[in-house]
């Protein structure tokens, strides 16, 4: 018995990219009307009620954030195929401490490395001859101010707060890197780190444009697949805050009437875990309830740069004293930034 071979349909690469981009745009513009239609027409909720506002907030922000996340991660993953981590390490090695620290913080902002890459990057940077302080500047800036946070924050709360967030993150990263570099804490790095020979593998294969796009999409599926639960949880919390938490309670905890609001929010943010995508909707809701800009920035930066899971990962490469010093310096910088932006926004 013979079987008929089904011809494989070959779709041009440019057509795939064009259709995918068009579908993304359609989904983006349909998110708002679809959310209001489901919340108020399908579910029959009252637009003026707290429940109606919370549900509409959730139904709109989930697709919006996931669309932004998918689009920017795909784009950055594609761009990353032209710049390897090894090239980043080579560019930072051997520089003057101050110049290298600023450069490392800048690299941290524009490169898509997350806290999951903290251990291998920490080892790789030190093995390549990058000073400890320079390495820490990158370590602070990369998870705190990354491309996902910038794009999502810009889309959700506007350019002013986004620029303030980037500047604040850069200042904290540079401050932490310079101070740690001056303290001479290399002996508190775990001994095995200095013995690691990372080695470098020469690229014998130059990927085609199709290879780069397929790799970018696989990377996007992997990253979005790992973070989407945190996005939904974060938006869910933001929706509850948006719909149910009274403004008076938010102002009492983190508002201008509490002189210890900023350190309290930083302390609250440390044990929490969320990436930037999950934190931004919460910040958006808190800002809408009257939380000052500086307090909101401090809370967000504490969650992204000082989360407990990241501290557990970093403990694998740092001795307790170095890890405690790192947390203290970064937390102090975040507190100062919070108070400063609250003062400027008065």
Image (cartoon, rainbow, N blue to C red):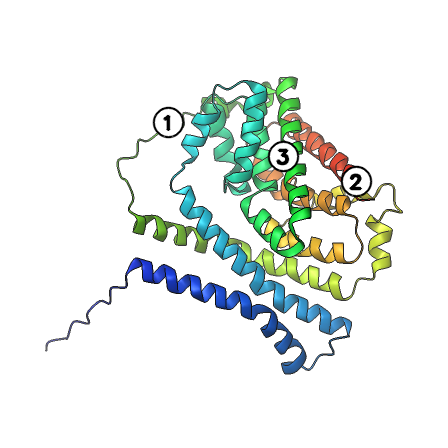
| Secondary structure of the residue carrying numbered label 3 | helix
| Secondary structure of the residue carrying numbered label 1 | loop
Badge 1 crowding class, 10 Å Cα cut-off, few under 14, some 14 to 19, many 20 or more, is: few
84 vs 337, left or right, is left
The quadrant of the rendering that contains the N terminus is bottom left
Q: Earlier in the sequence, mark 1 or mark 3?
A: 3
Q: In this picture, is 228 found above or below 243? A: above
The reply to whether residue 272 is visible in this rendering is no
Badge 2 crowding class, 10 Å Cα cut-off, few under 14, some 14 to 19, many 20 or more, is: few
Q: CA distance from mark 3 to mark 2?
A: 18 Å
Which residue shows up at 76% across the image and 34% down it? 336
Q: Earlier in the sequence, mark 3 or mark 2?
A: 3
Q: CA distance from mark 2 to mark 1?
A: 48 Å
Q: Nearer the viewer, mark 3 or mark 2?
A: 2
The quadrant of the rendering that contains the C terminus is top right
Q: Provide the residue designation for mark 3.
A: 170
Q: Provide the residue designation for mark 1.
A: 199
Find residue 228 and report its horizontal and vertical position in percent: 55, 58
Find residue 302 and report its horizontal and vertical position in percent: 69, 42
Q: Earlier in the sequence, mark 2 or mark 1?
A: 1
């Amino acid at each position: 018995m013979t079987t008929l071979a089904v011809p494989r349909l070959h779709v041009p690469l440019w057509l795939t990219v064009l259709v995918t981009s068009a579908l993304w745009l359609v989904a983006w513009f349909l998110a708002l009307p679809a959310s209001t239609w489901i919340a108020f027409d399908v579910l029959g909720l009252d637009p003026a009620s707290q429940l109606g506002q919370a549900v509409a907030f959730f139904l709109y922000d989930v697709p919006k954030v996931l669309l932004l996340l998918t689009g920017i991660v795909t784009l950055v993953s594609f761009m990353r195929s032209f710049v390897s981590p090894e090239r980043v390490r080579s560019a930072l090695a051997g520089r003057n401490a101050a110049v290298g620290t600023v450069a490392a913080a800048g690299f941290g902002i524009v490169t898509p490395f997350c806290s999951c890459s903290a251990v291998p990057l920490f080892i790789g940077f030190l093995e390549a001859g990058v000073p400890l302080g320079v390495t820490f500047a990158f370590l602070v800036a990369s998870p705190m101010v990354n491309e996902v946070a910038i794009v999502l924050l810009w889309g959700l709360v506007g350019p002013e707060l986004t620029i303030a967030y980037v500047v604040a993150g850069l200042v904290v990263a540079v401050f932490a890197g310079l101070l740690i570099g001056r303290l001479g804490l290399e002996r508190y790095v775990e001994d095995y780190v200095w013995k690691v020979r990372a080695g470098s593998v020469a690229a014998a294969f130059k990927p085609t444009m199709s290879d780069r796009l397929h790799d970018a999409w696989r990377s996007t599926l992997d990253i979005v697949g790992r973070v989407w639960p945190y996005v939904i949880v974060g938006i869910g919390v933001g929706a509850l805050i948006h719909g149910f938490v009274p403004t008076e309670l938010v102002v009492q905890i983190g508002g201008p009437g509490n002189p210890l609001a900023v350190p309290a929010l930083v302390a609250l943010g440390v044990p929490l875990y969320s990436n930037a995508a999950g934190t931004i909707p919460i910040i958006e809701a808190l800002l809408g309830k009257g939380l000052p800009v500086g307090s909101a920035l401090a809370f967000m930066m504490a969650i992204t740069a000082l989360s407990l899971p990241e501290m557990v990962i970093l403990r694998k490469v740092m001795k307790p004293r170095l890890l405690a010093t790192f947390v203290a310096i970064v937390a102090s910088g975040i507190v100062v930034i919070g108070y400063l932006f609250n003062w400027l926004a008065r």
